[in-house]
């Protein structure tokens, strides 16, 4: 076993990846990172982390696969229905007081939650006044997000989540079906801009009324969590709303002092004035 | 909730359970008392929604300090951390737990394999893994990881398991140190 040098090897691999491709993974949370690295070690049939260095440096496709793995693509429409219910109940009334509303969905993966948001805003007669920016650093995910096309087989789950979140219609109304797929209407897409943005290396994203960044920070270590949390807060206008994942924890972050709690259970916060 | 004394985590216990796991966990926690000198991380498969109730009932019936895990929570001796629904629970470092929403393993999130593999990675030979009743083969890969890093593996005896599939899958890996009746597991954990 090469256990004694595991930390050193990990650090060298991250340095190599940064020097070769510019991707910064050094401050990702260790346990999730190790899962991915072990998987790539298995595929490369090696039990040394450092053996991945020559592989990633010389084989662009192998590294591209690793990058794809590093960005989490697990998402669904109206994921955590009670969160969307809370959003509809306590945040939408706030949004209604603005003539124009900017929403940033950071780490949108394949985009299902951005479409969920657009549907909810439409039902609240707010969509016309809204611009949703949905970003991710995984181009493959963004391609799917932009297409608005998802497997028809997922619709039952999406419908169930939507209904639990307080939706009263059929999601059929918002999409067309065919070829075992659903495709969301252009009317929703019109208000969503999908763009590439890397929370680790890119900067502030303009003055948002509402930011959703759910289950992204869990993949970062404390230092990076703090940095990204500050970036999110800097991207909010005064009194803007920030929504995190339901088991995320900002108690140990310096930036937490810049926020006040709106809904403790659903992890909804407001930037202090 | 009693506030535990803060001391270095020297060793760790991780437990995997599925169907029938609630009453099995209750038996073990009751047997442990309140002064055990290691943290316990538990992955129990569950539907979303009942997790808070599960934690509260386990805490009140057994007198132990049981918490629902949050990301990057510090880990203390004498405390029990339950995996929340729809997240994997992991050992992040020697004194921190973490969560992820990675793909399901054996249709499960949380998955026992994810917990065990991360525990083996950080605690090496200072971890004891326990596989309890369950109707799923999740945990078998994790048991191998624990064994390969020098840790100990305990499995609930098939006779005492409400559902035998999970302990059976663990035993079949050949990586098991002890097969114990449910009633004897707490005493074993306190001793070892």
Image: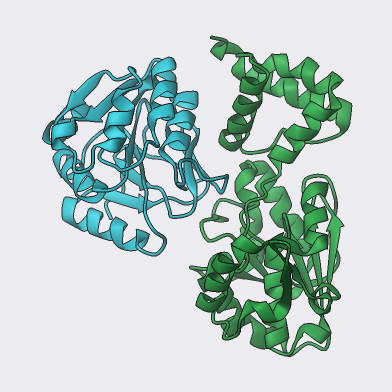
**Within the image, what quadrant is residue B182 found in?**
top left
Q: Residue at x 60, y 25 (%)?
A: A38
Q: At x 41% / y 38%, what residue is drawn?
A: B112
Colour scheme used in the picture?
A: by chain
Please state the total of marks drawn on the protein image: 0
Residue A155's x, y, as percent? 61, 67
| Relative side of B156 to A254, left or right | left
Residue depicted at x 76% and y 37% = A67
As displayed, is residue B108 above or below residue A95? above
Could one spot residue A138 in this view of the protein? no
Q: Which chain is cyan?
A: B
Q: Nearer the viewer, residue A2 or A46?
A: A46
Q: Colour of chain A?
A: green
Front residue of this view, candidates B123 and B109 = B109
Residue A97 percent location from the top left of the image? 74, 90
Outermost residue to the front:
A179
Using residue B141 as the reference point, say whether residue A187 is left or right of it. right
The answer to whether residue A272 is above or below residue A220 is below
Where's the C terminus of chain A, which quadrant?
bottom right
Residue farthest toward the top in the current orientation of the protein: A1
Q: Position of residue A271 (x, y in %)?
A: 68, 70
Task: Please state the horizontal and vertical placement of residue B108, each as a whole percent of the image.
Answer: 45, 46
Residue A115 occupies which quadrant of the picture?
A: bottom right
> Residue at image x 32%, y 20%?
B152
Residue B58 in view here? yes
């Amino acid at each position: 076993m090469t256990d004694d040098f595991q930390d050193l090897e990990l650090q060298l691999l991250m340095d190599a990846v940064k020097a070769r491709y510019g991707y910064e993974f050094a401050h990702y949370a260790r346990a999730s990172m190790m899962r991915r690295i072990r998987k790539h070690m298995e595929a490369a049939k090696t039990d040394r982390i450092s053996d991945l260095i020559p592989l990633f440096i010389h084989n662009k496709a192998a590294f591209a696969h690793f990058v794809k793995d590093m960005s989490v693509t697990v998402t669904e429409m109206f994921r955590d229905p009670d969160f969307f219910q809370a959003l509809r109940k306590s945040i939408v009334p706030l949004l209604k007081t603005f003539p124009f509303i900017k929403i940033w969905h950071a780490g949108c993966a394949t985009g299902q939650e951005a479409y969920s948001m657009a549907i909810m805003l439409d039902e609240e007669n707010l969509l016309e006044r809204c611009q949703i920016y949905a970003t991710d650093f995984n181009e493959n995910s963004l391609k799917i997000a932009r297409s608005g096309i998802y497997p028809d087989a997922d619709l039952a789950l999406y419908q169930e989540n939507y209904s639990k979140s307080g939706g009263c219609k059929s999601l059929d109304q918002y999409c067309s079906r065919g070829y075992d797929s659903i495709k969301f209407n252009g009317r929703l897409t019109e208000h969503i801009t999908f763009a590439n943005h890397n929370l680790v290396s890119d900067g502030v994203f303009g003055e948002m009324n509402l930011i959703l960044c759910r289950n992204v920070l869990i993949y970062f270590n404390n230092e990076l969590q703090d940095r990204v949390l500050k970036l999110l807060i800097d991207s909010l206008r005064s009194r803007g709303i920030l929504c995190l994942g339901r088991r995320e924890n900002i108690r140990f972050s310096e930036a937490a002092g810049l926020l006040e709690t709106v809904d403790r259970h659903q992890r909804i916060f407001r930037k202090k004035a | 909730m009693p506030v535990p004394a803060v001391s270095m985590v020297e060793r760790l216990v991780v437990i995997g359970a599925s169907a029938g796991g609630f009453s099995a966990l209750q038996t073990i926690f009751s047997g442990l008392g309140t002064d055990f000198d290691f943290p316990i991380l538990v992955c129990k498969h569950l539907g979303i929604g009942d997790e808070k109730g599960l934690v509260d009932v386990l805490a009140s019936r057994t007198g132990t300090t049981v918490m629902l895990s949050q990301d990057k929570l510090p880990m203390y001796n004498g405390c029990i951390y339950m995996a929340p629904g729809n997240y994997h629970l992991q050992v992040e470092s020697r004194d921190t737990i973490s969560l992820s929403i990675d793909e399901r393993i054996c249709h499960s999130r949380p998955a026992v394999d994810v917990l065990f593999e991360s525990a083996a990675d950080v605690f090496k030979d200072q971890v004891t893994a326990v596989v309890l009743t369950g109707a799923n083969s999740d945990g078998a890969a994790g048991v191998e990881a624990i064994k390969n890093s020098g840790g100990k593996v305990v499995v609930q005896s098939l006779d005492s398991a409400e559902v035998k599939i999970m302990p059976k899958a663990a035993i079949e890996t050949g990586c098991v140190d002890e097969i114990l009746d449910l009633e004897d597991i707490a005493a074993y954990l306190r001793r070892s």
